[in-house]
Amino acid sequence: MCLQIGGGGMDLRGQTFTLEGVAASLLILLAVYTIFQSTVVIAPSWSDYANVQLKQLGYDILRVFDSDGGNSSLKGAIVNCSSGFKAPDEFNANLSKILDSLNAFGKVELIWVNGSKIESHALYGFNKTPTPDAVRVSRFVVVQDLNNSECFNLTTPTTKVVEVRLTLWRT
């Protein structure tokens, strides 16, 4: 039994659309709730933004230098390192230009396993003490037939995995 006012009947089609709308909105709310409860959203504060950006630039610098570009590559700096852990002039000049253009300072360390101990040395010219808010990135370089007696005390060719660690900071 239906109450008719003004000559019209009950509109079942309108009720169906209303129920579909309510069901769809509940489904969307459930999906949003599930997403925010199951994931961690990390939003760096503005003070950390510069460090995140500098860290990404550090990864990019190491990626650019990790090529077979002779003395200006990471491998070239390791193979042609001279006494006192001085990298080739070409490598030093290119890295200095990049750091100067970023208004940043850098420390480059070489870390490798020598027998049963881990050794670490900073490259000459890039061995300053970083500030507390410095960022550090690294890249592993495999050097086959490394025979550098000046820096690595090797007398026979050996394959070495050397971690090149770049610490960046701004003042």
Image (spheres, grey):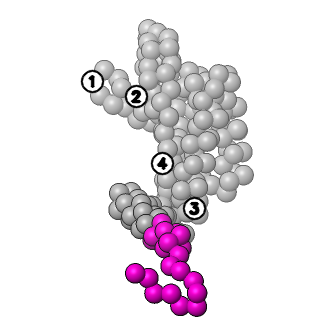
Which is in the foreground here, disc 4 or disc 2? 4
Could one spot residue 142 in this view of the protein? yes
Q: Earlier in the sequence, mark 3 or mark 1?
A: 3
- Inspect the image, locate mark 2, and give the three-letter code of the amino acid beneath it: Trp
Q: Earlier in the sequence, mark 3 or mark 4?
A: 3
In the image, 37: left or right of 74? Answer: left
Residue projecting furthest to the bottom: 6
Q: Tell me, for residue 50, which label it has, or none.
A: 3
In the image, 152: left or right of 102? Answer: left
Q: Earlier in the sequence, mark 2 or mark 3?
A: 3
- Inspect the image, locate mark 3, and give the three-letter code of the amino acid beneath it: Ala
Q: Residue at x 45, y 27 (%)?
A: 162
Which is in the foreground here, disc 4 or disc 1? 4
Q: Are the two marked residues, 3 and 1, in contact with CB atoms closer than 8 angstroms?
A: no
Q: Residues within 10 Å of mark 3 (few under 14, many from 20)?
A: some
Q: Which residue is mark 4?
A: 136
Residue 112 at x, y = what percent?
40, 28
Q: Residues within 10 Å of mark 2 (few under 14, many from 20)?
A: some
- Taking the magenta stretch, the answer to whether it contains residue 10 is yes
